[in-house]
Image (spheres, grey):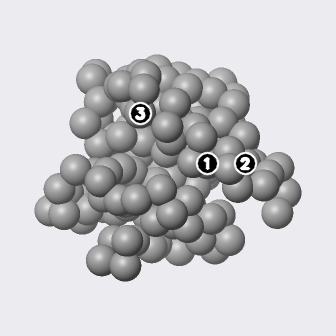
């Protein structure tokens, strides 16, 4: 896998740290930028053009779905995964332009595997993770 630069957006610094560890445990993945809200994520994505963006669904200013929608509307083609807390939020995230959705309480392996699967697929593909295996 080529070197992948990631933008990680989550309101909680300790969760960002855990997600960083999960993602950087896979070869070739680097969390190059972090944001604590959707607006800062949007600004950093515009400036840095990350390859991959992981968004929390419930962030201040712009939530993950609003951020994903704004990114797609602006033509930013990074692969996007949204972490949602409830199963019923999956459809909103996918409709907003996310390539995949992960339930926030999924295990580390589900998160890592979903991210790697999204990176392996074409940008037009849409995937939802099956957390029942975790």
Regarding residue 21, the answer to whether it shows in the image is yes
Rendering coords of residue 19 (x, y %): 51, 41
Q: Residue at x 79, y 52 (%)?
A: 28
In the rendered view, tell whether residue 15 sits above or below residue 125. above
Q: Which residue: 53% across, 74% down? A: 125
Give the CA distance from mark 2 to mark 3. Answer: 18 Å
Query: Is residue 98 rendered to the left or right of residue 53?
Result: left
Is mark 1 in CB contact (under 8 Å) with mark 2? yes
Q: Is residue 9 left or right of residue 75?
A: left
Q: Residue at x 55, y 67 (%)?
A: 113
The CA distance from mark 1 to mark 3 is 12 Å
Per the image, the residue denoted by label 2 is 29
In the foreground, 31 or 65: 31
Earlier along the polypeptide chain: callout 1 or callout 3? 3
Q: Residues within 10 Å of mark 2 (few under 14, many from 20)?
A: many
Where residue 45 appears, as percent x and y from the top left, is 58, 32
Q: Which mark is residue 23?
A: 1
Q: Earlier in the sequence, mark 1 or mark 2?
A: 1
């Amino acid at each position: 896998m080529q070197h992948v630069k990631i933008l990680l957006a989550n309101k909680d610094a300790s969760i960002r740290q855990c997600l960083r560890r999960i993602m950087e445990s896979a070869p070739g993945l680097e969390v190059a930028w972090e944001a604590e809200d959707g607006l800062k994520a949007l600004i950093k994505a515009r400036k840095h053009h990350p390859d991959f963006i992981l968004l929390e669904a419930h962030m201040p200013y712009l939530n993950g779905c609003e951020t994903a929608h704004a990114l797609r509307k602006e033509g930013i083609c990074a692969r996007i995964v949204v972490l949602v807390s409830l199963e019923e939020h999956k459809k909103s995230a996918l409709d907003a332009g996310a390539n995949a959705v992960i339930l926030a309480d999924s295990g580390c392996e589900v998160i890592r595997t979903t991210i790697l699967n999204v990176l392996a697929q074409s940008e037009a593909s849409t995937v939802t993770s099956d957390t029942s295996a975790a």
